Image (spheres, grey):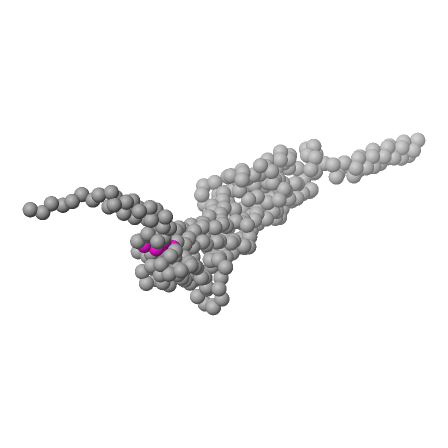
Amino acid sequence: MTIERTPGWRGLLLVAAALLVSLALPASALAAEPANATIDIPVHRLVSGDVPETDDTCTLTLTALGGAPMPDGSASGTKAVRITGEGDASFGRIVYTELGEYNYTISEAKGSNQRYSYDGTVYSADVQVTWRDEPGGEMVATLYLAKEDGIYKQEEALFADTYAMPTSVTVDPPVRKVVDGSPLVAGTFTFRLAADDAADPMPDGSAGGVRTFSCVGAGQAEAGTITFTEPGDYGYTVSEVDGGASGYSYDKTVYTMEVRVTEADGRLWQTTRYARDDGTTVPAMGFTNTFRGSAFPWTGDANGLAPWSAPLAALAVAVVAAAAWKRRHADTHSS
């Protein structure tokens, strides 16, 4: 029968000495694996040109080549980040467990906003993983960026997009005035252009989405030019203001003016439709007034009487003087 002997005090001393030696050694000497290397690849977006009313969001994509390690959140060797307006972003921390060279590309997806010229640059991102100080120690990752169409090293993956406002479009509403009858003095006629939405574009001189304008006698009335800088559907009404001038009947027609503005090829395009109250489409807006007053302005109409007051007074004086002369002449012959 074999009997195992329990270590004596000398054995215990050896065990204690080994424990003290292990505590005195640096951690790197006891590590089974070297320290991993990590890197976080940054990207930057710059927007130039006109100032957009709202910031656009771009998408930047990191793509691994040859099975290179990727950050968390990747799928099928790609990881996308988004930047709204200008700013910075990163794809997240990539962990490397082995020495070597790892390759990636970084690119920007072309967005749907046609006012932007999106940067088509594709960057090569090469990561070199080496020992920091000595073999078997700590690993370190170094990033090298270059444009695929060039050979120069880049400081950062910069994507420069340009925003440009489209060329504006204008509408000058045509309003035609027709006068039936024979007034001796041309009247002044006033019209009203009103926007369905007071915030919509209007000609200069408007207030609260309303523009009043006039013309004298028959002819063209000018509301002014309306400038559109954004696509959309815009609605207006055009009517004549009843001025109450004696002898005139006023046109009660109310026209609708519908302007559709679209955007393509860096500019705006417009189509305008004019329609009467009953929905009938017309090529232009026209108002007809009928004058049925006297050929002589005896009605007290301020539009017609004032210019004739002095000549009429002179005529009355001449008639009275002629009558008096005639009486005197008759009296002389009778005596």
Residue that appears at 30% across and 53% down: 32
- Residue 106 at least partly seen: no
Residue 122 falls in which quadrant of the image? bottom left
Q: Nearer the viewer, residue 130 or 69?
A: 130
Residue that appears at 55% across and 44% down: 201
Q: Is residue 34 magenta?
A: yes
**Residue 136 image offset from top left, x and y in percent:** 35, 59
**Residue 126 image offset from top left, x and y in percent:** 41, 62
Q: Is residue 132 magenta?
A: no
Quadrant for the C terminus, please.
top right
Residue that appears at 32% across and 63% down: 66
- Residue 204 at least partly seen: yes
Relative to 171, is 120 on the left or the right? left
Q: Main secondary structure of the magenta part?
A: loop
Residue 192 falls in which quadrant of the image? top right
**Residue 181 image offset from top left, x and y in percent:** 62, 43
Q: Is residue 321 shown above or below 164?
A: above
Residue that appears at 54% across and 40% down: 199
Q: Nearer the viewer, residue 334 or 111?
A: 111
The residue positioned farthest toward the left in the image shown: 1
The stretch of residues the image draws in magenta is 33-37
Q: Nearer the viewer, residue 133 or 98?
A: 133
**Residue 104 image offset from top left, x and y in percent:** 38, 60
Relative to 58, is 66 on the left or the right? left
